[in-house]
Structure formats: C-alpha cells, structure tokens
Image (cartoon, helix red, strand yellow):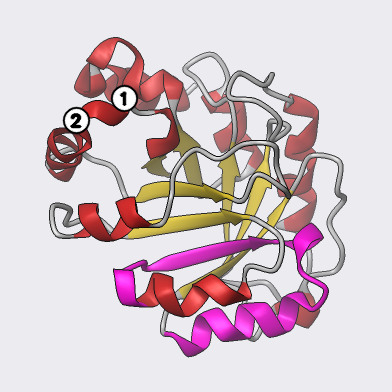
Amino acid sequence: MIIAPSLAAAPQHHLEKLIKELNILDVGMIHFDVEDGSFVPMMTLGLKIISELRTFSVKPFDVHLMMHQPEWVIAQLARMGADSVSVHYEACPYPRRTLGLIKRYQMKAGLAFNPKTELPSLQHYRPFLDYVVILTTEPESKNAAYLPSVLHKVVDGKKQAGLAGVRWMVDGGVSPNNISEVVKAGADIVVVGRSLFNGGAIKENLALLKKSAEG
C-alpha cells in the first residue's frame, strides 16, 4: 500500500517546509487536486504551486484534474514536472484520447470516478491506463462524508479482465477509522489529507495510519 498525502488538506502557509518533511517519510507520492470551480464547486490549489514545489521534493507528483476539458493543461503539467495525471471519466467526452495525450507526454495516466458513477468496462482504455481513482467522498466540500459503499467499485474493478498492472487509488475521507477496509477492498494507493496533517503531527499520524491499515 502506498500513502499519497493530499496537499489540498495541508496548511498552505508553509508548504516548502512541509514538502521537505514528507521527503524523509515513508510516503509514495505527493497528491495535488486541481479544480476549475465548474466541474466541482471548489478551487483549492492552482497550477503554479506544482512548479514551485517541484524543486523541493524528491517524491513523484500525482495530479488529479477535477475540471472540464482538462486536455489544455496536460502539456503544462509535464513541463512542471508532474509524474502522473488523472482526469475524470465524467469530464472527458473521449477519455481514451485524453489518456493517450497524458502518455504522449511521458506521464502515467489515470481515470477518476465520482461516487455516483459506476465503472464501465475499462479494457477499452487499457493501452493508456495506468491507474484508476475511486472517490469515496462527493467532491462538493472539504469536509464531505466518507462513503464506504463506494468501495465495491475497487473490488469489482479488480475483477475485470485485461487490467493486469493497473493500480487502484482511493481518495476521500480516509482516516485511521476506515483505512483498513480501504486496503481490504484492494486499494494500492491511498490518498490521505486531514488525517495526515491534523495537528501538524505528520510523522505520528502517518504511523497511526499505517498501523491501522493492517487491521
């Protein structure tokens, strides 16, 4: 299991210091949410923060684009040093083409699904698909409730034929209280936000999350 800290939940006034602290901790990547205020009713992080923090981090940067028509920003993200980019199935008229564009810029490509969206057959996207993002909160507010019923998509999705090597990421409301069920469902990557940065005790919170994940 890979832990991916979500910077949208981090205190924004000292991100450089925070990124340097994450460099020496056992986290697998840094997760950025980039919203347009249209596809989702929020705007938390802008693109500039990705390029500014890149020089301070040794961890891969994973960017979750929560926006309509995300194609325009993909080349820019590649120049900024993003390692992986996910786009929303609901926001792309031609998801296969968008995933292919991400791969053309030498980044890993992911397809994200809101809680209300059931998984289609993903074999059609497999030539370009590296990972799937399952949202376990509604992307409507920072404190949206965790939705355990959504985890069946991870269980069912991992049974689809032809997806060997595709990783499954769960994002939304994960805490020590529920991370074990997220892992048991089959999540390879777990995005954590408030539960990691709470009280500024990142090292201690990370240890608790990892212990709790073992069930």
The disc label shown at residue 11, or none: 1
Residue at 50% across, 89% down: 104
User: Percent x, y for residue 24?
Assistant: 12, 41
Q: Is residue 114 above or below residue 204?
A: below
Examine the rendered structure and indicate whether residue 183 appears above or below residue 131.
above
Q: Does residue 11 appear left or right of residue 68 in this picture?
A: left
User: Residue 172, image x and y in percent?
Assistant: 59, 32
Residue 81 drawn in magenta: yes
Q: Point out the stretch of residues depicted in magenta.
A: 79-105
Label 2, residues with CA under 10 Å away: few <14, some 14-19, many ≥20:
few
Mark 1 residue type: Pro
* Position above or below: 82 against 16: below
The numbered dot on residue 86 is none
Q: Which element is circle 1 on?
A: loop
Find residue 14 and name its label.
Answer: 2
Q: Is residue 45 magenta?
A: no
Q: CA distance from mark 1 to mark 2?
A: 7 Å
* Residue placed furthest toward the top: 199
Q: Cβ–Cβ below 8 Å for labels 1 and 2?
A: yes
Answer with left or right where residue 106 lies relative to residue 141: left
Q: Residue at x 69, y 19 (%)?
A: 145
- Which of these two is toward me, 123 or 60? 60
